[in-house]
Image (spheres, coloured by chain):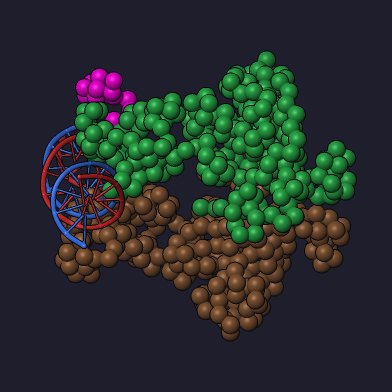
Chain colours: A green, B brown, C blue, D red
Amino acid sequence: MLKSSIKTKPQFANRHLYEQIRDHFVELIASGEWQADRPIDSETDLADSLGCSVGTVRKALDTLEAEGLVTRKQGRGTFIADHSSEALSMRFSNLRIGNGQRVCGLVATCDVVVDVATVDERRWLGLGEQDRVFRATRIRELHGRRFMYETVVISQRQMPLLVEADFSNPRVAAIGARRHNMLAGKAEERVSIAAASGIVAEALGIKVGDPLLLLDRVMFCINGKRLEWRVALCSLHDKYYMADII
Amino acid sequence: MLKSSIKTKPQFANRHLYEQIRDHFVELIASGEWQADRPIDSETDLADSLGCSVGTVRKALDTLEAEGLVTRKQGRGTFIADHSSEALSMRFSNLRIGNGQRVCGLVATCDVVVDVATVDERRWLGLGEQDRVFRATRIRELHGRRFMYETVVISQRQMPLLVEADFSNPRVAAIGARRHNMLAGKAEERVSIAAASGIVAEALGIKVGDPLLLLDRVMFCINGKRLEWRVALCSLHDKYYMADII
DNA sequence: GCGAATTTGTGCGTATGTATT
DNA sequence: TAATACATACGCACAAATTCG
């Protein structure tokens, strides 16, 4: 399938060969054609079947490796990173416990509604006037202690296959992305301070007015589309928030 | 100088050729031998003078480019990124104003002492029992408004050439790194909430007990050594803290 | 334990495309 | 236009890690 574009003299193709191949690989990963449990074809086999050189395949895989989509092991092969796995979807949580491990806890209570997007929701998720969203209000707990009151918003048009029960998973965005052949890429999180309202104070067992960490996060797909908007009020207690600056 | 290690059959050298060359380039950058205002030698010239192939030089430069140490422009050349420039040292500040631009403000007041490191300072900077540190207590302002009360700690043994006046620059770590032929690499910042003490409240013109964002940051060199420990109490007002998750 | 086969990693060399001066 | 410099693409040989008979 790529052969046609290859034969049209690469210097006139608008995109470079290794970029086309990279995108082709991304498709194979997102669609699930490349499974996470077994190695993909060897670099030489891929080069043969694509009709290009091994070096070009390697360059395409280099970018995928840098993006965290694959891992390569000398002597073994190249493996797809399982983005719906706990370890990988956890990277979007900057909350850590004493030993430095990331945590996201469990969903204690969860209310989901489908509604027309508000102005803010349209803005943060890049939606149109009449677009609808899943809007989940959740309380999360760690070691039996309630520590987070959050609102998770996901476009219904983008993830029609999501159902209410999915929102009981703290990593619902990763689950939904997997189900809709999308790949989570990066996120931007605004951090500030907010005082606990009556509802939040009762939910978390704290006093009204107590200061909480306000986490306002937008998750993006690997192709740049917006995946999830989340606003969380977080009581740190024995946890801390850590930002990596690179 | 690299020739010797090259001729000792690369397969028996403990480190790969492109890694040796990368480290060699890092040295040239840190020492200032490669200046920021003019392009470095071309890839082919570098390959010739090092006695290796162009591909190996390119691979070494690839890693430097990924680390943000150089930028390459087709048809022009490869240029050193000026790490003491405001734009680059600003990347360690996650505070932003409305338009999304990073800010670090100005130093309004600054008290510097040289003292034996405390237990915490030894821990965060990886120092020994009798090591001494510069410890600066500063107040920072933006648009005439005081917003941050911070303590900056830097190892005196690591940066003997620093003087008191340097700490009046908000980016003193970058200045010191440049002067001592070091290169800032990454940072880890813990974010939590703290109540304003009497001293801090007076310094920032707020009420005692007001909640402030507590920013606890360790900066690292490109070689992994610890460069600076900073604890800041921050009143957000018209700013916000943003963490990029990638 | 050993060697063969497989797979990724390193290193070299060349030709050509493309942007800049 | 010509020269220069980085970028892409190809191919080859060998090193190093893994797996399996």
- In the shown orientation, is residue A154 left or right of residue B13? right
Could you say which quadrant of the image residue B233 lies in? bottom right
Residue A159 versus residue D12 in the image, above or below = above
Q: Is residue A183 left or right of residue A118?
A: left
Image quadrant where residue B101 sits: top right
**Up-down: is B88 above or below A228?**
below
- Front in this rendered view, residue A93 or C3: C3
Q: Is residue A8 magenta?
A: yes
For the point 67% across and 58% down, the residue is B215
Q: Is residue B31 visible?
A: yes
Quadrant of residue A72 within the rendered picture: top left
Q: Position of residue B128 (x, y in %)?
A: 55, 80
**Horizontal side, residue A146 vs residue B160: left or right:** right
Question: Up-down: is B71 above or below B222?
Answer: above
Q: Residue A143's spot in the image, x, y percent? A: 71, 50
Residue B109 part of the magenta-drawn span: no
Residue in front for this viewpoint, B115 or C5: C5
Q: Residue furthest bottom?
A: B130
Image height of C9 relative to A152, above or below: below
Q: Say if residue B183 shows up in the picture.
A: no
B218 or A162, nearer to the observer: A162
Picture coordinates of residue B210, whole percent (x, y): 83, 55
Of A222 and B30, nearer the camera is: A222
Residue at the image point whose x is 63% and y is 64% from the top: B230
Q: What residue do we see at 85% from left, 48% from top?
A: A206
Q: Residue at x 47, y 64 (%)?
A: B224
Q: Which residues are magenta?
A: A1-17
| In the image: residue A118, left or right of residue D2 | right
Residue at the outermost top position:
A130
User: Residue B45: x and y, percent?
Assistant: 21, 55
